[in-house]
Amino acid sequence: MRGEVYRDEWGIPHLWADSALELARAQGRNAARDRAWQIEVERHRVCGTTAATFGPEAVEWDRFARQARLADTAQRCFDRLERVAPQTAAWVASYVDGVNEGLAEGAATAPEFTAAGLTPDRWEPWTPLGIWLSTHILFAGFPTKLWREEVARRLGDDAIELFATDGPGTSGSNGWLLTGDRTATGAAIIAGDPHRFIENPGVYQQIRLACPEFDVVGLAVPGVPGIAHFGHTGGVAWAITNAMADYQDLYRERLRRTATGGVEALGPEGWETAAVHTETIEVAGADPVPVEVIETGRGPVIIGGPEADLDGGGSGISLRYPPRVTHALGFEALPELLRARDVAGLDAALDHWVEPVNVVLAADTTGATLHRVAGHVPLRPRENRLRVVPAHDAAYAWRGHHTPLPRTTVDSTAVMANARGLATPFGVEFAPPHRAARIRELLDRSDRWSAKAMTDIHTDTRLASARPLLDLLATATGLGPDATRLRDRLLGWDRHMEADSTDATLYAAVRAEVVHRVAAHPALAALTGPADPAVTSAYPAMFRPWLAAVPRIAFALETLLTHGPLPHADRLAAVAEAAEAVAARCAEGEEPRPWGEHHRLIAWRAWPDADDATPLPGLAGDHDCVLSTSSVPGVTDGFARGPAARYVWDLARREDSLWVVPFGASGIPGDAHYRDQQPLWATGALAPVVTDWNTLHRTEESAELTVDSAARAVRTRVHEQEVPGFGTVRLVPVDPAADLDLIHGWVTEERASFWGMGEASREQVLETYEFLDSLTTHHAYLALRDGVPVALFQTYEPAADPLADCYDVQPGDFGFHLLVGPVDTAERGFTGALFSVFIGYLFSDPEHLRIVAEPDARNEKVIARLVREGFALGPEIDKPEKRARLVFLDRPAATQA
């Protein structure tokens, strides 16, 4: 078994292996070598053991991870996977085998392990499922329900949705799809950027995964096999955004301690026994922390306990989330996504998707498109989506899940930017429409878009949400001279948050002042004033960012300045006072600096390194810009959330696709590729997606790899041809041993009965193709379409073949056999496109004057196809293995065809 790692000039790994299983193993090994520290920290997060390295500040997460049963849920999901999808479970386990093989080497090159005194531990087969779960457990924003409870308690139930907009704790994205009628090539383009908290190393790893079954480029999550969110298989490409769906519930539990020390919970049918045990969190530099883990019939208790007394009654809050209930994370979709050849295949794969709930855009090389919601959304009352609901009331129980989820095709253009759309029925808080509207506005300016031009969309800085504040400022009266000049300057501003703009800085300063004045208004005093210590102390510290009033007010500022509890006169006064305050600072000599000097990246890193002293770049953009680098008005001009990657998938030519990440391909400080993409990312530039294996260099190989065994993808090609609208077809010599699984699978299928090897064993197939490989007159090739095998193509010299005994061989005759693989041959023009390549190759040698084929005389379909391609019918002949029909295509006829 084989697996190789090649790299392009950006250090991006391109992996090749002889099977999907071995490729998963190679991917795991690569993750361990390139991202050892990152994935080990993630493993500890799943297990709730980070405090043993990072000290007391990590205890809150560890307590949550244990109480939410993240590791146990991952184990249960993997156990189910072994039962219902054993091949997928084996694929995940193979990835884990690779991680375990590579961790020691990866840890030796990562200085953080020595600095932290940490030794990598063995991964379990369920660990990747745990990493996926812990990475996305907060995506649906269940802590926001705690915030809404506070809003309702302090301002009343009518105000519960007053702040219903995506805030500082959410993760969103931009994504758009242009169909072929909107592009210069006539093929679709998909582009966008996921918005997450920026981490170093990044949460997304650029990677290529190739084996005989597929060849996919995309953005992987280190620690998880495959390519889940953003990928291009050559035939189909896809991208996602957060659907902003609500699919996790919080239940207010009544808990009581039993005489024996157990716990009971009040459920719909009365008091019921809860599962309970105690775990211990080891803490570096401090005493161990015991954690009581309780689980009711609704789910794990993550807040409170039997002795707690939470406001609103009850003594605990439990979390119900789909993977805990169904024991499914949707990993069945991951290998199917890699194997997808078209939109239909991708859509079928996404039917397995569970967590998180996403909106998906996809397109393929035939022109088919897809716009759908994917994931598991439970059926329950709307109240569940809004707030904490009583556990003892059966009305709030889950009653199945929504199916089917919305899906449609794309007419010309589709945009997804976390705003209301296909997923509206499933959510509460969505992004304002500004990003989506701006993307559409920009895209409508042309119908000749190219992949390279997509950076103009990625980097747009128009801030439409500035309008309400500026409209109020325009009508403000009684301003002093300095504030009047400031007002006039901002009203003349183009509303672009460019890095070199001092006007953008002034706007941000006024906005921050407005936020504080709105927060101090009597209408919101109950919300922003001192909190009830008895209530706030019950909430774990990790949820306090969701409960902070000022950021909530900042992100809902547009709403609060247009309607809500503040009278219009008070809104106007808040804006006027803010302008006066900023103008006064300017009059005192505080000249504004460019926005980029304030708006700097605040990246998260699990352990400091020497590079942390290097200033991170200041950027353009802001929360509601397409370039969504999210500051928190009134708190900081810096940003921690922004584009965690950018991508452009070109369906005309995959090699024209583009991508970039905030730092680099390597997670090892000091590596040449640790931060080499940062200048591109900071300026909006993109790196090319490399697809030509001949331009790559091999950097390492698997422990079982022999140096003289080249991967199929990098074998010397005998012919390559670009077919417009179809892709790149490459002919590469068959490697009998390496390609045995593929060829044996093809030739023994029922549809290949005329090939004559339906009953052949693996050993017989290997012997046959090893014999062919030893001949100089007969050759076997695989035809790769954009790197994916689609046909077995064999050539021979008739004079050196038994066929010579059956007809009069002419000088210049050259024969061939063709077996099309198990692909969608219903694709319009598929066979014709392949034939054009094969005929072109056969006649590329000037000595070949006539092409000869001898299909089985009963194979009327193939014979008819050959006639349509210009072949002339010859006589039927008897061969030892079949009765055949000779067909001929001479060079003049081929030229005319």
Image (cartoon, helix red, strand yellow):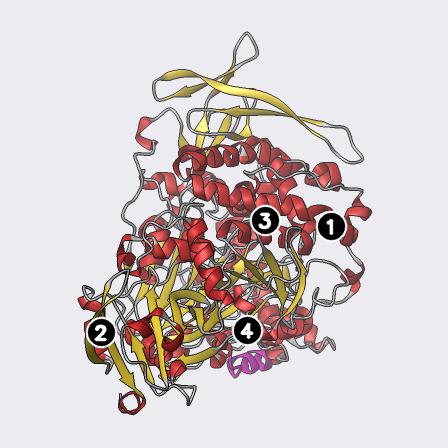
Q: CA distance from mark 2 to mark 1?
A: 55 Å
The quarter in which the C terminus is drawn is bottom left
Tag 1: residue type? Glu
> Observer-nearest residue: 244 or 4?
4
Foreground mark, 1 or 4, reads 4
Q: Which residue has dot 2 on it?
A: 865
Q: Which residues are magenta?
A: 484-494
Question: Sequence order check: which comes first, mark 2 or mark 4?
Answer: 4
Give yes or no for contact between labels 2 and 4 (Cβ–Cβ under 8 Å).
no
> Are circles 1 and 4 on residues that touch, CB within 8 Å?
no
**What SS does tag 1 mark?**
helix
Of the two numbered discs 2 and 1 on the same chain, state the one appearing first in sequence: 1
- Per the image, the residue denoted by label 4 is 716
Q: Please name the amino acid that badge 3 sits on.
A: Gly
What separation in Å lies between label 2 and label 4 (alpha carbons)?
30 Å
- Foreground: disc 3 or disc 1: 1
The numbered mark at residue 223 is 3
Q: Which residue is mark 1?
A: 105
Q: Are marks 3 and 4 in contact (CB under 8 Å)?
A: no
Q: Earlier in the sequence, mark 3 or mark 1?
A: 1
> Secondary structure beneath disc 3?
loop
Measured as percent of width and height from the top left, residue 200 is found at 67, 58
Secondary structure under the numbered disc 4 in the rendered image: loop
Work out which residue is located at the far top of the displayed protein and give it.
259
Q: Nearer the viewer, residue 764 or 838?
A: 764
Which comes sooner in the sequence, label 3 or label 4?
3
